[in-house]
Image (cartoon, rainbow, N blue to C red):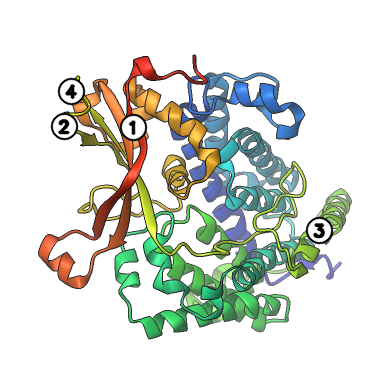
């Protein structure tokens, strides 16, 4: 069945399976390190309270059966172990049902986390990882040919990511249409990277060229992914180069990394060998068998289901009221994607401070430093992606005035007053050597990147000015909230 088995895509399957598994590995490491202080029984938004409040509307999750912090850790460790096995290629050496089962375990465990994760897991790339992991389950093992239908579904997923992002930009904000978006983006993006300052300081005409090139990459190139080789591979290369540019210019968790992996679904073995001749012997493995009949039926059934579910995201792409990062079912399959439909023109940051002094009016205040978000002006941004710092992203939304963030932020202040160790471990640096402060407060500062002259003079990449107070001084006695 030549229409079912792809003979030119062994490398594509290799990269997709191991790459997606590696992203799952990173995601489950974040579960182990962040889930308990953010969402555990004593977390900022406890899962048991959330599930008791929303019930079945949360969607499928193992935690509805029962929740405990030990169970959350078990989910994280099982996810890490299964993902590591797939990265090593162990399940792929067996029958096709073995990697199928391994990826479905990853998908099911992470679905449980996302559906219980509330605002800390409310990002489009969570659904993207879930859908990519689900599709990867049907790529088969090394003993069977790569299914053409699954590769087409991967390209359709990539098309929704890229074309959806391009259309939401054109519809969402005039700065994308007049090519001035990068006058602001590198400075105001959620979590700048170590090179973001330099990207921001590039000449403005070059910024306009960058935006125009982005429009071509997202609005034209995705259609070429479905054309015969070598055009499809060239289109994939354009996507990969564009995403690498974004990786260098900022921290967007695993969004860019996963998008590059999806692009490999359009890269043919012969085209890859032409670029990297040393890979030619490894890619010349000969034709593989399509696999047993039940495998063919299973892949075709899954494909039909995904095609049926694709109606809503397809129509969304054409809608004047296009939704960005929309999930149309509780399984996070066949969703809509997109990013940065609008660009923030200025950067506000919430700075949290504490003091051990008894009188807040005359106190000396010390800053809590977060791992990724801007803090002290002299602290240069770090590279964290593809790892996702969920608390830091929440702080960015909080500074934008998002009301959904205020509930957990109040609890965060209380945890700081308690010097709660799991919460403090989410931070890069905290004052008082882990002792509990007497008071905490939160002030708002306006941030901008320093100029070349300011950088030379002060060695600070940021310049900040106080813009107001978000939360006045609080002590434990004054706090009454959801944890009481």
Please give the residue where the numbered disc 3 appears in the rendered image. Answer: 312
In terms of sequence position, does the residue under pointer 3 or pointer 4 come before the other?
A: 3
Q: Answer yes or no: do the residues labelled 1 and 4 have beta carbons within 8 Å?
A: no
Tell me: 54 left or right of 234: right
Q: In this view, does 242 lie to the left or right of 60?
A: left
Instruction: Place residue 107 in its image quadrant.
Output: top right
SS type, badge 2: loop
Residue bearing mark 1: 472
Alpha carbon distance from label 3 to label 2? 56 Å
Residue located farthest toward the left when viewing the structure as drawn:
457
Q: Which residue is drawn at 68% across and 45% down?
A: 99
Q: Residue tagged by mark 2?
A: 364
Residue 444 % position (x, y): 34, 46
The mark nearer the N terminus, 3 or 2, is 3
Element at badge 4? loop
- The local crowd at label 3, few if under 14, some if 14 to 19, many if 20 or more residues have their Cα within 10 Å, is some
- CA gap between label 1 and label 3 equals 46 Å
- Give the image location of residue 47, x and y in percent: 59, 26
Q: Which of marks 2 and 1 is nearer the N terminus?
A: 2
Establish if 82 lies above or below 36: below
Give the mark, 1 or 4, whose residue is nearer the N terminus. 4
Q: Residue 357 carries which label?
A: 4
Indicate left or right for 224 with 478 as reference. Answer: right
- CA distance for labels 3 and 4: 57 Å
- Mark toward the start of the polypeptide (2 vs 4): 4
In this view, the mark in front (2 or 1): 1
Is residue 333 shown to the viewer in this render?
yes
Pointer 4 local density, CA inside 10 Å: few below 14, some 14–19, many at least 20: some
């Amino acid at each position: 069945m030549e229409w079912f088995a792809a003979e030119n895509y062994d490398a594509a399957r290799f990269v997709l399976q191991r790459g997606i598994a590696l992203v799952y590995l990173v995601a489950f490491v974040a579960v182990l390190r962040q889930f308990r202080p953010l969402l555990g029984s004593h977390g900022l938004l406890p899962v048991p309270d959330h599930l008791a409040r929303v019930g079945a509307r949360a969607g499928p999750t193992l935690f509805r059966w029962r929740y405990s912090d030990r169970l959350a850790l078990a989910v994280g460790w099982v996810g890490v172990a299964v993902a590591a096995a797939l990265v090593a290629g162990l399940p792929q050496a067996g029958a096709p049902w073995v990697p199928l089962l391994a990826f479905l375990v990853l998908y099911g465990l992470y679905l449980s986390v996302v559906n219980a994760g509330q605002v800390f897991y409310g990002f489009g790339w969570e659904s993207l990882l879930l859908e990519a992991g689900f599709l990867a389950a049907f790529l088969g093992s090394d003993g069977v040919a790569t299914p053409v239908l699954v590769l087409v579904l991967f390209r359709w997923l990539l098309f929704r990511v890229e074309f959806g992002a391009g259309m939401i930009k054109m519809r969402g904000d005039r700065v994308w249409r007049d090519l001035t978006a990068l006058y602001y983006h590198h400075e105001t993006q959620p979590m700048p990277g170590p090179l973001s300052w330099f990207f921001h300081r590039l000449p403005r005409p070059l910024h306009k060229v960058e935006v125009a090139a982005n429009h071509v990459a997202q609005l034209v190139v995705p259609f070429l992914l479905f054309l015969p080789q070598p055009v499809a591979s060239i289109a994939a290369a354009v996507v990969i180069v564009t995403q690498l540019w974004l990786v260098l210019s900022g921290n967007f968790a695993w969004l860019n990394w996963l998008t590059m992996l999806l692009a490999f679904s359009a890269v043919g073995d012969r085209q890859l060998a032409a670029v990297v001749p040393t890979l030619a012997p490894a890619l010349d493995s000969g034709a593989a068998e399509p696999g047993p009949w039940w495998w063919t039926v299973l892949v075709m059934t899954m494909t039909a289901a995904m095609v049926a579910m694709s109606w809503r995201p397809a129509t969304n792409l054409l809608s004047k009221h296009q939704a960005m990062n929309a999930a149309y079912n509780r399984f996070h399959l066949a969703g809509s994607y997109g990013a940065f439909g609008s660009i923030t023109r200025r950067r506000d940051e919430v700075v949290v401070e504490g003091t051990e002094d008894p009188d807040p009016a005359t106190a000396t205040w010390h800053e809590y430093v977060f791992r990724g978000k801007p803090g002290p002006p002299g602290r240069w941004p770090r590279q964290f992606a593809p790892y996702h710092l969920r608390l830091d992203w929440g702080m960015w939304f909080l500074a934008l005035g998002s009301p959904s963030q205020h509930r957990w932020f109040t609890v965060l202040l209380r945890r700081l007053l308690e010097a709660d160790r799991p919460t403090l471990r989410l931070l890069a640096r905290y004052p008082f050597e882990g002792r509990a402060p007497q008071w905490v407060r939160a002030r708002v500062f306006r941030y901008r990147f320093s100029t070349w002259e300011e950088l030379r003079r002060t060695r600070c990449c940021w310049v900040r000015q106080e813009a107001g107070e978000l939360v006045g001084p609080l002590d434990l006695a004054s706090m009454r909230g959801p944890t009481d």
